[in-house]
Image (spheres, grey):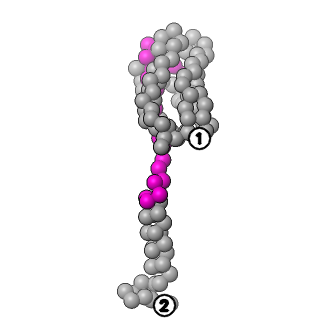
Amino acid sequence: MKRGKYGFRTTAAAAALAALVLAFSLVTTGCKSYWIDTSVENQTGQPIHELEVDYPTASFGTNTLAPGGVMHYRFQIRGSGPVKVEYTSPDGKTVHGQGLTLEERQQGELGIRLLPQGKVEFLPKLQPGS
């Protein structure tokens, strides 16, 4: 095996140098991830079941959310489309809500409040992606 000046294998040194160059090029080209931090608050006064939040090209949710409970989720947007919320109330009724339209590369925070009588409030703090 051929070793370089400092005793390392030359192929390992070349691989390390290539990784360093790649990392530097990603930093200098402005590669950036755009995230939306979401909080879903159950302010209905009752436990809810089968919560699902749909956003462009994906969804998230939970089986149950207690009264006053908060679910946090972080996601990226691919494409564009509306945010939709669906859950089952304690009396077995399915509640639907639709909010704002999200666009790819937006970032920031999105609050979703589940209110009494099947109302849903969307509280966006979003900036367009650059």
Residue at image coords 48%, 11%: 116
Q: Between 116 and 64, which is closer to the camera in this rendering?
A: 116
Task: Indicate the position of residue 13 as horizontal and vertical percent values.
Answer: 45, 79
Q: Which residues are magenta?
A: 27-50
Residue at image coords 45%, 73%: 16
Q: Between 34 and 63, which is closer to the camera in this rendering?
A: 34
Dot 1 amino acid type: Arg
Task: Indicate the position of residue 19 as horizontal and vertical percent values.
Answer: 47, 69
In the picture, residue 5 is in which quadrant? Answer: bottom left
In space, the residues marked 1 and 2 are separated at their CA atoms by 47 Å
Badge 2: few (under 14), some or many (20 or more) residues near its Cα, within 10 Å? few
Badge 1: few (under 14), some or many (20 or more) residues near its Cα, within 10 Å? some
Is 41 contained in the magenta span? Answer: yes
Above or below — where is 10 with respect to 111? below
Which residue, as the protein is rendered here, is positioned at the far front?
Answer: 130
Residue at image coords 59%, 27%: 82
Q: Nearer the viewer, mark 1 or mark 2?
A: 1
Which residue, as the protein is rendered here, is positioned at the far left?
Answer: 6
Q: Are marks 1 and 2 in contact (CB under 8 Å)?
A: no
Is 117 contained in the magenta span? Answer: no
The residue labelled by disc 1 is 78
Task: Indicate the position of residue 90 as horizontal and vertical percent values.
Answer: 54, 14
Query: In what element is the residue under mark 2?
Result: loop
Dot 2 amino acid type: Lys
Residue at image coords 47%, 63%: 25
Task: Give the label on residue 64, or none.
Answer: none
In the picture, residue 95 is in which quadrant? Answer: top right
Task: Indicate the position of residue 57 as horizontal and vertical percent values.
Answer: 62, 37
In the picture, residue 4 is in which quadrant? Answer: bottom left
The residue labelled by disc 2 is 2
Chain-order first, disc 1 or disc 2: 2
Above or below — where is 94 with respect to 52? above
